[in-house]
């Protein structure tokens, strides 16, 4: 009974403070793929960037210390972590495969996988396994068929984190992994955008409510002989959501990236991604829990150039843009980079 009460309490906490993240992919005229992602969270994450080398051996630790899936990295990758852990919150490997974890209240994980313990991986290790093992989405899909995922309590969050996963590759394909009703759902994402609750299928259906929006300004109209002109620029997008709820952020990014002129160069594509991220930036204090103690705000954003393998970022306290070049990282050991401006 106590365990049930704890689980219900944890669910209420997670749903009440459903942290806001947004993830999307855009392609330039020449096909350069760039991923933009924002990290909004009410608890300070203390994030760092970590370089993980190819050849690194890892064994996933399951509940009660059991040893699960083991693998050796085929590819090096860069990852953004949280709470000093080696867990990948967001990242990119040397083949241009992108991975991100987003908050998803209501996630219900499989209770017991059909695979042996040696083919079971802890949820917090999935990003490391995917980025270290696979070159593209097609291979990720094949690999997921052979493993089971086990979710366990993370002390840093006082519970099992409810999440779903967003994956992109250099071809422009996007994949979403959700845990619904105790099953893992591997879903192609046709619009290349992901936020939070509800599930992806709901967000895609909801887009139909906004098909009247346009980048074109409205013309003047006559009512009984009187002409009424538009009030100004942007009338074609009058009605686009402006709040920070997951459905509104999904709609806003899906529409803006659709109407935005395709970039001609890699640099322009990176610049466009940062401009899109600017439209959903949350200032500290404007989104908070009912007790006014939990402030959800944009702690950092990243822009990943999947072709040139550069991970750009800026943080809440430092709006300058910095980058780490995966092509220039060498060595057989992990290496950490301080994210400028992430000191609390």
Image (tube, grey):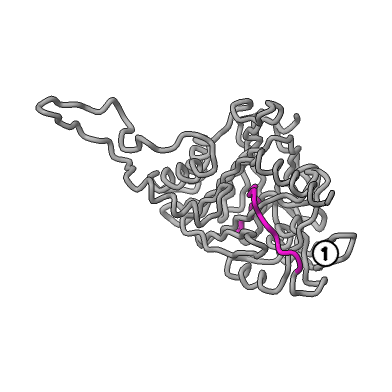
Q: Is residue 88 above or below residue 47?
A: below
Q: Residues within 10 Å of mark 1 (few under 14, many from 20)?
A: few
Q: Which residues are magenta?
A: 96-112
Front residue of 302/224: it is: 224
Relative side of 78 to 205, left or right: right
Is the magenta region chiefly helix, strand or loop? Answer: loop
Relative side of 25 to 29, left or right: right
Give the residue displayed 37% in from the left and 45% down from the top: 210
- Whether residue 335 is visible, yes or no, is no
Q: Is residue 173 magenta?
A: no
Tell me residue 215's x, y (percent): 33, 41
Give the residue displayed 67% in from the left and 63% down from the top: 182
Front residue of 41/281: it is: 41
Give the residue displayed 67% in from the left and 45% down from the top: 324
In the image as oriented, which residue stretches furthest toward the front? Answer: 1
Tell me residue 312's x, y (percent): 61, 43
Give the residue displayed 63% in from the left and 49% down from the top: 104
In the image as oriented, which residue stretches furthest toward the right? Answer: 65
Tell me residue 78's x, y (percent): 70, 52
Q: Read off the residue under disc 1.
A: 57
Q: Is residue 98 magenta?
A: yes
* Rendered image quadrant of residue 56: bottom right
- Whether residue 89 is visible, yes or no, is yes
């Amino acid at each position: 009974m106590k365990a049930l009460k704890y689980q219900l309490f944890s669910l209420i906490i997670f749903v009440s403070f459903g942290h806001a993240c947004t993830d999307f992919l855009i392609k330039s005229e020449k096909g350069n793929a760039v991923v933009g992602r924002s990290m909004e969270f009410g608890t300070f994450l203390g994030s760092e960037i970590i370089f993980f080398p190819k050849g690194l051996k890892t064994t996933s630790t399951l509940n009660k210390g059991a040893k699960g899936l083991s693998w050796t990295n085929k590819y090096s990758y860069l990852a953004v972590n949280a709470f000093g852990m080696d867990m990948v919150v967001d990242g990119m490997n040397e083949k241009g495969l992108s991975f991100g974890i987003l908050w998803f209240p209501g996630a219900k994980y499989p209770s017991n996988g059909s695979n042996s313990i040696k083919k079971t991986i802890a949820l917090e290790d999935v990003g490391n396994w995917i980025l270290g093992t696979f070159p593209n989405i097609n291979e990720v899909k094949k690999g997921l068929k052979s493993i089971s995922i086990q979710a366990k309590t993370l002390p840093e969050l006082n519970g099992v984190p409810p999440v779903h996963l967003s994956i992109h590759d250099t071809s422009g394909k996007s994949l979403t992994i959700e845990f619904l009703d105790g099953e893992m759902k591997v879903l192609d994402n046709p619009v290349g955008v992901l936020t939070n609750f509800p599930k992806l299928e709901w967000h895609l259906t909801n887009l139909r409510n906004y098909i009247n929006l346009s980048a074109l300004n409205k013309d003047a109209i006559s009512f009984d002989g009187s002409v009424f002109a538009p009030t100004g620029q942007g009338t074609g997008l009058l009605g686009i959501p402006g709040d920070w709820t997951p459905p509104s952020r999904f709609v806003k990014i899906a529409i803006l990236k659709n109407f935005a002129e395709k970039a001609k160069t890699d640099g322009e594509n990176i610049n466009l991604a940062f401009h899109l991220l600017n439209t959903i930036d949350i200032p500290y204090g404007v989104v908070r829990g009912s007790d006014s103690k939990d402030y959800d705000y944009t702690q950092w954003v990243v822009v990943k150039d999947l072709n040139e393998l550069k991970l750009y970022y800026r943080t809440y306290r430092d709006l300058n843009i910095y980058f780490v070049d995966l092509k220039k990282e060498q060595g057989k050991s992990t290496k950490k980079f301080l994210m400028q401006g992430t000191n609390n």
